[in-house]
Image (spheres, rainbow, N blue to C red):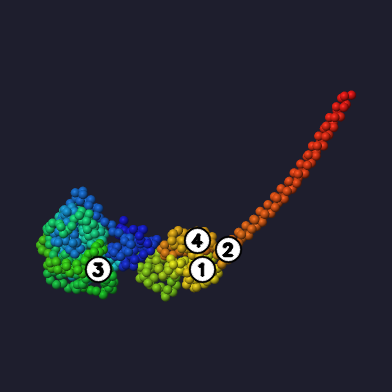
Amino acid sequence: MGIIDFKATKCKHCYKCVRYCDVKAVMIKDGRAEIMEDKCVLCGHCLQICPQSAKTLTSDLGLVQRFIRQGERVVVSIAPSYMGLLKYGTLGQVNGALQKLGFAEVRETSEGAAAVTAEYVELLKEGRMENIITTCCPSVNSLIEIYYPDLIPYMAPVVSPMIAHGKMIKKEDPDAKVVFLGPCIAKKQEAQDLRHEGVIDAVLNFNDITRWLDEEDIVIKDCEDIPFKKLDPRINRLYPVTSGVISSVMAAEAEADGYRKFYVHGSENCIELCKSLEKGEIKGCFIEMNMCEGGCIKGPAVNKDCPSPFRIKIDMEDAVAKEAPEKEELKNMMDGISFREDFYDRSPHDLQPTEEQIQEILRMTGKVRPEDELNCGACGYPTCREKAIAVFQKKAELNMCIPFMNEKAESLANLVMETSPNIVLIVDRDMKIMEYSAVGEKYFGKTRQEALQMYLFELVDPSDFQWVFDSRQNIHGKKVSYPEYNLSTLQNIVYIPKQDVVLGTFIDITKEEETAQEDYEKKLETIDLAQKVIHKQMMVAQEIAGLLGETTAETKTTLTKLCRSLLDDGSESGGR
């Protein structure tokens, strides 16, 4: 399972995440979005803008709770953005609340940020790099490694504050379980990166911790004020706000360096800067880059009800001391630890289509001329050509082209309405005719234009349509005759809830009914003829029976007389 997961039942034919993904790391398969993990920089935009909440973030909360139940010593490294995102009275109350959850120790990730700042200061002092891009933001690091690998030489070869802090904690207690708590989802991938194996054991976001505190009925403002015991990171607490890294570096520098310094935030601006760097337009700069607009305080795992990033930035800058931390104490914490990180080319090598293949895909969506390419962006891709390339690479589907599908649907609907041999009627709740097939003119004598201005009762009896509207039950295969139109029909009338209309189709069965009537009349004639034959046969039978009866009686009388005559003759002979 990836870091960002999907609820497939909710994700269907939306493409909003494709539109908002600046690196197009979302593919569409069977109408549903899927994250391409090898191309995703985990900026979290798709999580924030999904209208159906179809995208979910996998959580390590259960893992962390299991660590604590099993008696592990669990140390939490809390990102400095907590100062603007959690509700507390004093900083120490945040420490107290987390300890009540079972954490053995609560440390500020800003300690690691102070170590990173020291590494940046050394790079600036050396002055060997043409440009220096900060590597605190894992999303920026992924952006460059995947999409702009030519800029890797400009990436500061330094770990992020989270990794630096994890190493510092593990140095003090190798058996401790280190849990990072912050507003970033890309930290999960960074923690799992083999380059940092064994440094961070789990990653939580502020939504996770807020839910856990609520489950335990812990209110931060009611908790004990327990001061943080380790290094005071001071200005390094400003890392999560824009210009925070630059401010920390300038506060730590003993002398000025030769680099110009500026910061960039927001994915579009970061991409634009990368393109500019690729062109060689920028030289001799130290660049603070953050994928989240407004910095980490606007991360994808930040509650929507939090104050605006502008308010948080102002409050944090007012609350944080502008001095660098104690050098000697920081040096002792950094001793024996390597904070170096090597970055490498992770760019995907997607198969590129030929011009002929691109044109063929464009033709399949009705784009045969340049003017057919609307470049409307509804599919999520800025141009029809880029979308065609994505289709070739199996990242997109043909039917993502909304204008094409709309035109296709309209043409099919018009084709049905124009060529169907059956009468098709669609009416609204007021029995106003909304659609009327062309064949209706043949039967009702009204053109489509005329019918669309009429109500159903002006054509036929609307009672069946009204019954379907009221009962939400459909009628199938009902025979209805309209003598005034010399028309017999077989009707199907159905309710369409999505549009709140009723659709009726009338099949002309007039000839069939006439044929059936003729057949019926022929049957009646046949039955009548059969009845006459039967009657005549009965009469003949009765006459024959009568004649047979008379003949039998006469024969009986004659034979009886004959027998008596014979008997009489025999008696006379015996007497002699």
Q: Is residue 399 left or right of residue 458?
A: left
CA distance for labels 2 and 4: 16 Å
Say which of marks 2 and 3 sits in front: 2
Q: In the image, what residue occupies the spot 23% across and 70% down?
A: 264
Q: Residues within 10 Å of mark 1 (few under 14, many from 20)?
A: some
Q: Residue furthest right?
A: 576
Pointers 2 and 4 in contact (CB under 8 A)?
no
> Looking at the image, is mark 1 or mark 2 earlier in the sequence?
1
**Helix, strand or loop for disc 1:** loop
Q: Amino acid at mark 4?
A: Asn
Task: Depth check: give the residue in front, 180 or 350.
Answer: 180
Report the residue marked by disc 3: 293
Residue 151 point in image, percent of width and height: 26, 68
**Helix, strand or loop for disc 2:** helix
Pointers 1 and 2 in contact (CB under 8 A)?
no
Quarter-of-image position of residue 208: bottom left
Report the residue marked by disc 4: 492
Q: In the image, what residue occupies the spot 30% across and 66% down?
A: 147
Q: Amino acid at mark 2?
A: Thr
Residue 75 point in image, percent of width and height: 18, 55
**Helix, strand or loop for disc 3:** loop
Q: Residues within 10 Å of mark 2 (few under 14, many from 20)?
A: some
**Number of numbered discs visible in the structure rendering:** 4
CA distance for labels 3 and 4: 57 Å
Q: Amino acid at mark 1?
A: Leu
